[in-house]
Image (cartoon, rainbow, N blue to C red):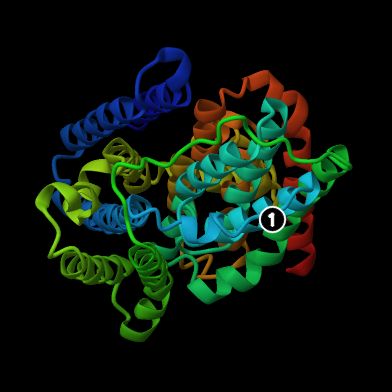
C-alpha cells in the first residue's frame, strides 16, 4: 500500500510542479491525487472515517481563514484603498524609489498575502516608470520583498499561516525570530540593484495608466476600508491570543464586521453604483482555484502522514544528513522549483509537534526558508508568477539578473537566523 501511495503522490506532485509546461491548472492534479490516495488508503485499511474527519477539520480551518483574508483584501482593493499608500510615494530619484517600493512591499505583504501585495505594487510602478527595463528590476525586488515580508508574519504567507494555525509557531515568536533574517533577505539584493541603478532618474510613462474609473469612491471610503481591512487582519493574532479561539473565527468575525460597515456606508447608493463595492461581489473575485488547490494538497499529504510515510522520511533525513539547518535550507531551495504549500504540509507531517514543540528552531526556520526560497526562481512563488504575467518577465532574464541576488539574500538571511539561534 505504501509504495502505491508514494507513486500516486509523486505523480500528482510532478503534475503540480509542471503546471506551466503541461498547461493544466495545479488544482486538478491536487484533487485527483487526493481522491486516489484516500481511495487506496480506504480500500487497504477499511476504516478511515476518524482520520478523514480529523484531516477535514484541520484543512477547513486553513481554507476558511484564507477565504476570509482574501475577501477582505478584495474589498479594500475594490474601494481603491491601497491608493492611501501608493499615492504618497513621490520621488524623482530611481534609487530612492527602489528603497521606498522595497520597504512598502515588505511591510504590506506582512499584512496582505504576497500575491496581492505584488499586484498592488506592480500596478504602482507601471504608473511611475516609463522604461521597461527599469520596471523589470523593480518587479524583481517586489517579488523578493513580498516573499520576505510574508515570511515573518503569521498572516503574511500561506505557509506561515499553515504553521501558525497548526500550532507549530505563535504570532509574537515568529515576528521576533524571523524579522531580522527577512530584512537581510530583502536588503542584500536591494542594495546591489540600487547600486546598479545609481544616478538614474525616473522616466515617467507618456500616458500614465488610469484607474478603473468606472467605480468612483470618496476619500473617506478609501481610507475607511483600507484602515478597517488592515486593522482586522492585524487584530486576528490578538484575537487568537485573548480568546484562544482558532484564527479562522477571528477572520470570519472581522469579515462580518467589515461587511456590516460596507452595507451601512453604501446604503443610500443605487444598486448599480454599489454592486462592485459589496462583499458579495468580492466573494466572486477571490481566487477559488487556489483555495481548491489547498484543499486537494492538504488532503493528499494527510494520507502520507496517517500511514507514517512522512515520519519514516524524516527519520531517514536525520540519519543521512543529521543537521536540521541543512535539511530546512534544502527545503527552501527546493521551494524555488516546487510549490511551497505541499512542501510545508509534508514537513508538518514529517516532524511531530511533541518532538519539536511550538516556536522551536525547526518550525521558525522552515517558515523563513519556505517563504523566501521561492524568490530564487520566478516560478517559485505566487508573487513571481504574478510578476511574470503582468510585466511579461522572461524566465531566463530573471535567472540572469535576479536569481543570484535572491540566492545571496536567502543565504544571508539563513546564516543570520542560524547565528541568532
Q: What element carries label 1?
A: helix
- The residue that label 1 is drawn on is 100
How far across and down, in percent of the image, does residue 263 sit?
Answer: 16, 65
Furthest toward the bottom, the residue is: 242
How far across and down, in percent of the image, does residue 164 sit?
Answer: 44, 64
Q: Can residue 324 be spotted in the picture?
A: no
Query: In this orientation, which residue lies closer to the viewer: 181 or 204?
Result: 204
Left or right of 277? Residue 217 is right
Left or right of 232? Residue 38 is left
Query: In this orientation, which residue lies closer to the viewer: 51 or 347?
Result: 347
Q: Can residue 194 be spotted in the picture?
A: yes
Q: Which part of the image, by quadrant, shows the C terminus?
A: bottom right
Furthest toward the front, the residue is: 206
Query: In this orientation, which residue lies closer to the viewer: 290 or 12?
Result: 290
How far across and down, in percent of the image, does residue 166 sit?
Answer: 39, 62
Q: Which part of the image, by quadrant, shows the N terminus?
A: top left
Amino acid at each position: 500500500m505504501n509504495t502505491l501511495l508514494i507513486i500516486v503522490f509523486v505523480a500528482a506532485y510532478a503534475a503540480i510542479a509542471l503546471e506551466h509546461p503541461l498547461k493544466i491548472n495545479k488544482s486538478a492534479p491536487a484533487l485527483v491525487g487526493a481522491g486516489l490516495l484516500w481511495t487506496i488508503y480506504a480500500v487497504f485499511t477499511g476504516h478511515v472515517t476518524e482520520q478523514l474527519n480529523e484531516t477535514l477539520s484541520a484543512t477547513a480551518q486553513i481554507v476558511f481563514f484564507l477565504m476570509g483574508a482574501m475577501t477582505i483584501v478584495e474589498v479594500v482593493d475594490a474601494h481603491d484603498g491601497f491608493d492611501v499608500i501608493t499615492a504618497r510615494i513621490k520621488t524623482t530619484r530611481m534609487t530612492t524609489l527602489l528603497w521606498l517600493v522595497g520597504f512598502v512591499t515588505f511591510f504590506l505583504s506582512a499584512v496582505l498575502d504576497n500575491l496581492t501585495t505584488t499586484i498592488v505594487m506592480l500596478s504602482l510602478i507601471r504608473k511611475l516608470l516609463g522604461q521597461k527595463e527599469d520596471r523589470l528590476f523593480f518587479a524583481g525586488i517586489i517579488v523578493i520583498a513580498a516573499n520576505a515580508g510574508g515570511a515573518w508574519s503569521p498572516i503574511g504567507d500561506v505557509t506561515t499561516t499553515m504553521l501558525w494555525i497548526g500550532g507549530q509557531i505563535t504570532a509574537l515568536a515568529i515576528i521576533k525570530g524571523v524579522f531580522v533574517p527577512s530584512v537581510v533577505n530583502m536588503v542584500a539584493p536591494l542594495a546591489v540593484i540600487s547600486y546598479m541603478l545609481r544616478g538614474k532618474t525616473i522616466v515617467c510613462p507618456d500616458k500614465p495608466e488610469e484607474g478603473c474609473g468606472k467605480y468612483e469612491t470618496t476619500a473617506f471610503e478609501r481610507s475607511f476600508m483600507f484602515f478597517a481591512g488592515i486593522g482586522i487582519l492585524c487584530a486576528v493574532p490578538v484575537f487568537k491570543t485573548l480568546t484562544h479561539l482558532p484564527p479562522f473565527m477571528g477572520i470570519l468575525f472581522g469579515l462580518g464586521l467589515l461587511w456590516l460597515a460596507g452595507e451601512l456606508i453604501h446604503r443610500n447608493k443605487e444598486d448599480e453604483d454599489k454592486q462592485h463595492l459589496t462583499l458579495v461581489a468580492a466573494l466572486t473575485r477571490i481566487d477559488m482555484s487556489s483555495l481548491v488547490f489547498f484543499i486537494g494538497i492538504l488532503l493528499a499529504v494527510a494520507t502520507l502522514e496517517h500511514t507514517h510515510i512522512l515520519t519514516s522520511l524524516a527519520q531517514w533525513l536525520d540519519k543521512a544528513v543529521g543537521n536540521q539547518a541543512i535539511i530546512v535550507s534544502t527545503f527552501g531551495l527546493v521551494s524555488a522549483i516546487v510549490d511551497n504549500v505541499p512542501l510545508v504540509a509534508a514537513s508538518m507531517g514529517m516532524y511531530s509537534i511533541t518532538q519539536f514543540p511550538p516556536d522551536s528552531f525547526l518550525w521558525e526556520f522552515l517558515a523563513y526558508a519556505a517563504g523566501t526560497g521561492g524568490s530564487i526562481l520566478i516560478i517559485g512563488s505566487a508573487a513571481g508568477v504574478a510578476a511574470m504575467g503582468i510585466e511579461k518577465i522572461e524566465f531566463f532574464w530573471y535567472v540572469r539578473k535576479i536569481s543570484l541576488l535572491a540566492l545571496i539574500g536567502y543565504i544571508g538571511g539563513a546564516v543570520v537566523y542560524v547565528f541568532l539561534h
